[in-house]
Image (spheres, coloured by chain):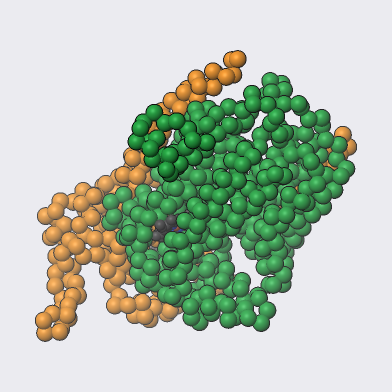
Chain colours: A orange, B green
């Protein structure tokens, strides 16, 4: 009996240590949690939100960030027709070549092209931002912990720096980024653009739309994945139940003897 | 041995090449204890997972490009352009976690019911060899997508070899195929990652040969004496294994379709960059307990020795455990130490994900010491001093009483 008490003491000792450390490490800033249309078992993208997101990317983010894994033709999935895509793509200037003369040339984009970075190379981009680099945004949502909420919090999280912090030019204070100092000027604020579809462009709406769009770029398979997933799970549950019944049936041959 | 087959062609072939009778012996007639519980499902689950890993890996290898400039892009190409490429890749990456989960439970089952004891020592050894091959294979596989964690994980782990006195640096250069982790490293990691699972299949074969020599252990841990205590594998355990597959596949599918990246690290969606060190390099969750022991000692070589010993010690526990009674069911004190050991393993896993400073360092040291004490102190001493409960005469007493 006394032995048992000894063991429970050890158990609770470890458990307490564990608990105290959990709360100790939890003092980091918590994210602004949003309810995303694409989260959960039945989550789906909201096409009009994605289209608005594309507009924001085009008019704001694309001055600094590329989206190199997204081809124009993939915009079909968010509700554009082939004609619209062709026309849209042709408004981009793409460098190509070399041609027969060995020269590089520019041509209008076609649906196979991607949203490339506005900078020639990483060095040029870093030079423009005192050494910081605006990353390609194709996978940014998957490349951050709790990607959608993190990006939302980051884009809406700019505040004045604490008094004792002197920021040099081109640096901004944002408690959500690692190190709390970021080289990106606040890209979004109320009415930074006018939506084509007339939606009210307040900061929340803008951020929600761009994050949804970026999530779609990072996980274009999400809807196919979730709808296939539901079918597979239902199938597996039925199959497993059948196995269970069969198993009970077969085992009753010996268990009842 | 030669069993009669009704089909003439089959009988003719089997007379000359007895694979069918061997298979029948192993998968149909094999006498199995009738009291096995669900913890005995995990062996067949590990087998099916290995198969899934090989098939999904084979498909991935048809699209993957092992080159530092293309690896990351080729994985994204699989995710975006290959038909159902995302499914194949998520099966493979989630599958690795599932594989370890299953094998950990499988090993824990063996520890609880004393399945490592005579006459199953070699069976147990083969299992540990499989586990070690899995570790190597999963480590190599994780480098292949060439994300930040791939690169820096490979850096940390290969740097371990510099701890070897005198020739350490040369060995690391040899492993890297150069003076830094670069294309030659990725290439050889890929070919070894491709090879090792097939080696595992080979060891699994011997694992099963050894298993069938004395048959499965069982929850009572006692030797079977009576034919009535066994039932043929088919249909009783074949159907039970299928039920297990069903439950497992459902859980597996939930992760693949609804949370495919929970086991992964977000940094691995950032392409590898040798000039930017991530603020916090952590291995996959299944390596954390061993990573914790590696870093518990501030001395590099000692840390490596301790980490390797934590696995090698498993080879000798058939002799460290001096108790003749196999199953913990009849070992009231050992049973409690067993659960503390499991808890301690989780603590190691948790502390392995922390930076080894301050209290974390102390906790990891205590937990490491406890890990080894379980094998080196508790096992030998309890065998001598513990009063075990009386064993039943046959397995039926147990199964009717409980
Ligand atoms: C013991 C079985 C195996 C284990 C534990 C394993 C583990 C892993 C892991 C952890 C990854 C990284 C996943 C990721 O983050 O994307 C990976 C990638 C990969 N594996 Fe395996 N693997 C196994 C078998 C195989 C086999 C048999 C093949 C080939 C025939 C293979 C081919 C690949 C390829 C091409 C990749 C890179 C693609 C990717 O990262 O998604 N694997 N493996």
**Residue B153: image x %, image y %?**
53, 66
The reply to whether residue A177 is in sight is no
Foreground of the two, A112 or A197: A112
B385 to the left or right of A21: right
Q: What is the count of numbered marks?
A: 0
The reply to whether residue B337 is in sight is yes
**Residue B395: image x %, image y %?**
69, 27
In the rendered image, the quadrant that contains the C terminus of chain B is: top right
**Residue B123: image x %, image y %?**
63, 48
A63 to the left or right of B352: left
Answer above or below: position of B375 versus A66.
above
Answer above or below: position of B309 versus A13.
below
Foreground of the two, B299 or B111: B111
- Residue at point 61%, 42% (across, down): B213
When asked about the image quadrant of residue A95, the answer is: bottom left
**Residue B61: image x %, image y %?**
36, 59
When asked about the image quadrant of residue A38, the answer is: top left
Answer above or below: position of B341 versus B5.
below
- Residue at point 43%, 61% (across, down): B194
A251 to the left or right of B11: right
- Residue at point 39%, 78% (across, down): A126
- Residue at point 15%, 84% (across, down): A102
């Amino acid at each position: 009996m006394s032995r048992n008490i000894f063991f429970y003491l050890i158990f609770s000792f470890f458990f307490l240590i564990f608990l105290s450390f959990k709360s100790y490490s939890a003092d980091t800033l918590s994210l602004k949690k949003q309810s995303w249309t694409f989260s959960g078992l039945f989550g789906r993208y909201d096409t009009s939100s994605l289209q608005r997101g594309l507009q924001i990317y085009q008019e704001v983010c694309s001055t600094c960030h590329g989206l190199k894994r997204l081809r124009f033709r993939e915009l079909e999935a968010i509700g554009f027709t082939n004609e619209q895509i062709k026309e849209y793509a042709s408004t981009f200037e793409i460098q190509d070549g070399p041609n027969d003369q060995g020269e590089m040339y520019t041509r209008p984009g076609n649906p196979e092209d991607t949203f490339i970075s506005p900078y020639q190379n990483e060095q040029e981009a870093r030079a423009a931002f005192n050494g910081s680099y605006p990353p390609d945004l194709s996978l940014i949502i998957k490349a951050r912990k709790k990607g959608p909420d993190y990006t939302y919090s980051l884009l809406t999280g700019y505040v004045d720096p604490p008094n004792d912090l002197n920021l040099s030019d081109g640096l901004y204070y944002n408690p959500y980024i690692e190190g709390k100092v970021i080289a990106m000027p606040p890209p979004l604020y109320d009415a930074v653009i006018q939506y084509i579809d007339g939606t009210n462009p307040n900061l929340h709406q803008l951020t929600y739309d761009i994050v949804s769009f970026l999530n779609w770029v990072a996980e274009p398979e999400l809807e196919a994945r979730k709808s296939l997933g539901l079918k597979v799970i239902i199938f597996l549950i039925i199959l497993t139940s059948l196995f269970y019944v069969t198993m009970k049936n077969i085992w009753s041959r010996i268990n009842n003897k | 041995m030669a069993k009669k087959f009704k089909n003439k062609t089959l009988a003719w072939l089997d007379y000359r090449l007895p694979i069918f009778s061997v298979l029948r012996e192993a998968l149909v007639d094999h006498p199995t204890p009738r009291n096995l519980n669900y913890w005995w499902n995990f062996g067949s689950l590990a087998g099916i997972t290995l198969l899934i890993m090989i098939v999904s890996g084979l498909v991935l290898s048809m699209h993957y490009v092992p080159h530092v400039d293309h690896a990351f892009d080729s994985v994204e190409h699989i995710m975006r352009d290959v038909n159902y490429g995302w499914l194949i890749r998520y099966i493979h990456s989630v599958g690795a976690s599932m594989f370890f989960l299953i094998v950990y439970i499988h090993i824990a089952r063996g520890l609880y019911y004393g399945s490592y004891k005579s006459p199953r020592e070699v069976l147990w050894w083969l299992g540990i060899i499989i586990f070690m091959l899995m570790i190597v294979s999963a480590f190599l596989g994780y480098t292949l997508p060439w994300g930040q964690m791939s690169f820096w994980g490979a850096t940390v782990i290969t740097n371990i070899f510099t701890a070897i006195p005198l020739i350490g640096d040369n060995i690391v250069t040899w492993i890297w195929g150069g003076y830094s982790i670069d294309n030659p490293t990725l290439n050889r990691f890929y070919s070894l990652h491709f090879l090792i699972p097939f080696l595992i299949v080979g060891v699994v074969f011997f694992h099963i040969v050894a298993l069938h020599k004395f048959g499965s252990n069982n929850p009572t841990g006692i030797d079977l004496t009576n034919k009535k205590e066994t039932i043929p594998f088919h249909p009783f355990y074949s159907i039970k294994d299928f039920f297990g597959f069903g439950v497992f596949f459902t859980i597996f599918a939930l992760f693949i379709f609804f949370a495919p990246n929970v086991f992964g690290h977000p940094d691995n969606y950032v392409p590898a960059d040798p000039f930017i060190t991530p603020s916090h390099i952590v291995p996959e969750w299944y390596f954390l307990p061993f990573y914790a022991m590696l870093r518990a000692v501030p001395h590099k070589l000692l840390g490596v020795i301790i980490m390797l010993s934590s696995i090698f010690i498993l080879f000798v526990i058939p002799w460290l455990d001096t108790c003749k009674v196999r199953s913990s069911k009849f070992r009231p004190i050992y049973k409690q130490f067993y659960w503390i050991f499991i808890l301690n393993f989780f603590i190691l896993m948790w502390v392995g994900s922390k930076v080894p400073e301050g209290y974390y360092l102390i906790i990891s040291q205590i937990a490491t010491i406890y890990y080894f004490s379980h094998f080196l102190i508790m096992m030998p001493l309890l065998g001598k001093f513990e009063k075990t409960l009386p064993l039943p005469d046959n397995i039926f007493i147990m199964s009717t009483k409980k």
